[in-house]
Amino acid sequence: MKRKFVFITLIFNLFVCFRVSYAHSEEQLKNEIFVYLGATQISHDWSTNLYGITFGHYFSRIVEIEFGFEHYGDSGSSYGGTWTSLNFIFDPHLSKRFRPYILAGIDLPIWPEFGAGMKIYLQRHFAARCEYTNFYDDDEGWTGNFRAGMIVVM
C-alpha cells in the first residue's frame, strides 16, 4: 500500500511540475536550435533532399531572428550545395502549444525567402516544427522548400 501511495504521489508531482514549468516557459526561454530534414523543388520535382540546422533568438516577445546552415543535394549525384540563411520569424504566440508563424529573410548570397510554418510544443524544452518557404534562386527562379524537424528550446 505504501509503494502505491509513493508512486501516485510521484506521478502527481511530476504532472504538477510539468504544468508549472510549461506555463512559465514562454517568459524564461529565449533561444532555439532547429534541426531538420526536408525536400526542395530546386530540381523541379521535389527529388532534392535538404538538411540543416538553425540557431534562433527571441529579441522581443514575438520576433525571433534565426541564422542557419542548409545543405541540399541529390543522392548519387554531384548536384548540390550549401547556403546560409538569416530569417526573421513573427510568432504572435496565439496558443501555448500550437504556434503558427510567418518567416521572411534571405538565403545568402542574397536570395529573398519567405514562408509560413507551425511550432508544436511537446514539452518545455522540445517542440516539433514544419514549414514551407519560397526563395528566389538566380538560376531556377522562385523555388519551394519543405522542412520538418525538432526544436530544442533553451
Image (tube, rainbow, N blue to C red):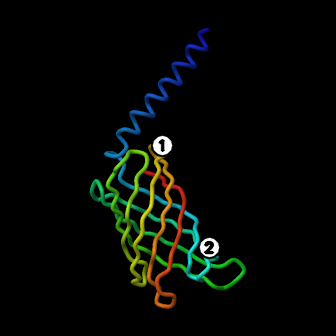
Q: Position of residue 140 (x, y in %)?
A: 51, 88
First of labels 2, 1 by sequence position:
2
Examine the rendered structure and indicate whether residue 14 appears above or below residue 142: above
Determine crowd level at label 2: few under 14, some 14-19, many 20+ residues with C-alpha closer than 10 A: many
Secondary structure of the residue carrying numbered label 2: strand
Examine the rendered structure and indicate whether residue 135 appears above or below residue 102: below
- Would you say 152 lies left or right of 50 here? left
Residue at (36% x, 59% y) in the render: 57
Q: Position of residue 151 (x, y in %)?
A: 49, 55
Residue at (60% x, 82% y) in the render: 80
Residue marked by disc 2: 49
Residue at (69% x, 83% y) in the render: 77
Residue marked by disc 1: 123
- Rounded to the nearest angstrom, the CA distance separating label 2 from label 1 is 29 Å
Q: Quadrant of the N terminus?
A: top right
Residue at (44% x, 28% y) in the render: 16
- Would you say 141 lies left or right of 30 here? right
* Dot 1 amino acid type: Gln
- Would you say 116 lies left or right of 75 here? left
- Quarter holding residue 104: bottom left
